[in-house]
Amino acid sequence: MSKIVFIGAGSMAEAMISGLIEKKMYSGKEIIVTNRSNDERLQEISRLYGVTTSRDYTKILKKASVVVLAFKPKDVVESLSLLKEDLSSDHLVISVIAGVSTDSITNLLGFEGPVIRAMPNTSASIGQSATAITSGNWTNDKHERLACALFEAIGKVITVDEEAMHLVTGLSGSGPAYFYYMIEAMQDAAVQEGMTEETARELIFQTFVGAAGMVKASNKTPHQLRKDITSPNGTTEAGIKMLQQEQFKESISSCIKIAKNRSEEMGKDIEERLAASISSRH
Ligand SMILES: NC(=O)C1=CN([C@@H]2O[C@H](COP(=O)(O)OP(=O)(O)OC[C@H]3O[C@@H](n4cnc5c(N)ncnc54)[C@H](OP(=O)(O)O)[C@@H]3O)[C@@H](O)[C@H]2O)C=CC1
Ligand SMILES: O=C(O)[C@@H]1CCC=N1
């Protein structure tokens, strides 16, 4: 039986594993997970999802057809140098690593194998990821269909040109955190105004779910939906005016730009380290 291997057992790997099992795309038995050194974490993942865990790369990669790279960008050079002996062009490599291009991965692996770069988000764990994928040079339709099916099992998938991946990363990869920050801020404000945390949470959560549902279901734009709530000289107008005064839109714009730039920087850092390692070999 051909398995899927996760190299990395952190938040993103767990979100994908739980979503894939929940949607029955893979059973726990068909998933192998490894990490660098955290034994407790591997035990926890195994207990929660019934997956196999191992640090024997040679053994696990022999059983796998799909290999998901789910470690941090800073670990790419070291981790791929450990993995490349056991990887071949028969493996489909799916990287969810922020910033790092398919070319960098191919160059680090040192052979022309299929690499798909994906940017999901942690809502994968409830089947609600927004994922963008892009294909490297050595993929075919079969690889792309497989990657699409995998990410469709855990949410919505779009295909983009690789240049767009930095923006996607700052927008929808990091995106859930921006909304959580907004919820946190609204909850803190309500508690400061005397509401219990429990009541605030209940009201705010449902308000978020309802607003997201409206954006999805309605044929109105978010702008129109906002206008519908904003009575002249009413509470919403007062609140929105304060957000405008505090430069809410400008803050969000800077947030997306800086996150996109950070993704670009992380990619460049890997390219520079790759170039340095090539020149040191000559
Ligand atoms: N978190 C998110 O919302 C999203 C993250 N991503 C991307 O997913 C990737 C993982 O992020 P996240 O899950 O948050 O990170 P975490 O820090 O939670 O997890 C990283 C994992 O990688 C493991 N690891 C590091 N080096 C190796 C190695 N050589 N072999 C095997 N495992 C290794 C670590 O093991 P150990 O703990 O033992 O060191 C750890 O399990 C990142 O590249 C990130 O950019 C993409 C989209 C969203
Ligand atoms: O913060 C990060 O670098 C990763 C990438 C997207 C979400 N988390």
Image: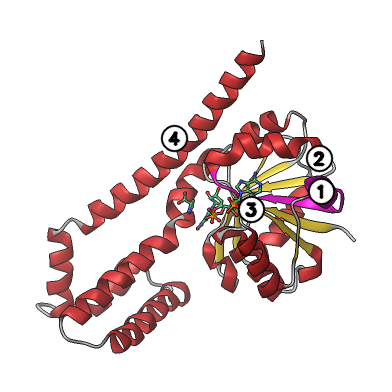
Q: Nearer the viewer, residue 24 or 240?
A: 24
Q: Which residue is mark 3?
A: 8
Q: Secondary structure at mark 4?
A: helix
Mark 2 vs mark 1, CA separation in Å: 6 Å
Q: Mark 3: give few (<14), some (14-19) or many (20+) Cα within 10 Å.
A: many
Mark 3 vs mark 4, CA separation in Å: 22 Å
Q: Earlier in the sequence, mark 3 or mark 2?
A: 3
Q: Earlier in the sequence, mark 2 or mark 4?
A: 2
> Is the shortest distance between ligand 1 and the CB of mark 2 under 8 Å?
no
The reply to whether the C-beta atoms of the residues labelled 2 and 1 are less than 8 Å apart is yes
Spot the residue most to the top. Answer: 282
Q: Which residue is mark 1?
A: 61
The amino acid sitting under disc 3 is Gly
Question: Does the magenta portion include 193?
Answer: no
Q: Which residue is mark 4?
A: 265
Q: Relative to residue 265, is residue 72 depicted above or below?
A: below
Q: Relative to residue 88, is residue 277 depicted above or below?
A: above
Q: Which mark is residue 170?
A: none
Q: Secondary structure at mark 1?
A: helix
> Is the shortest distance between ligand 1 and the CB of mark 1 under 8 Å?
no
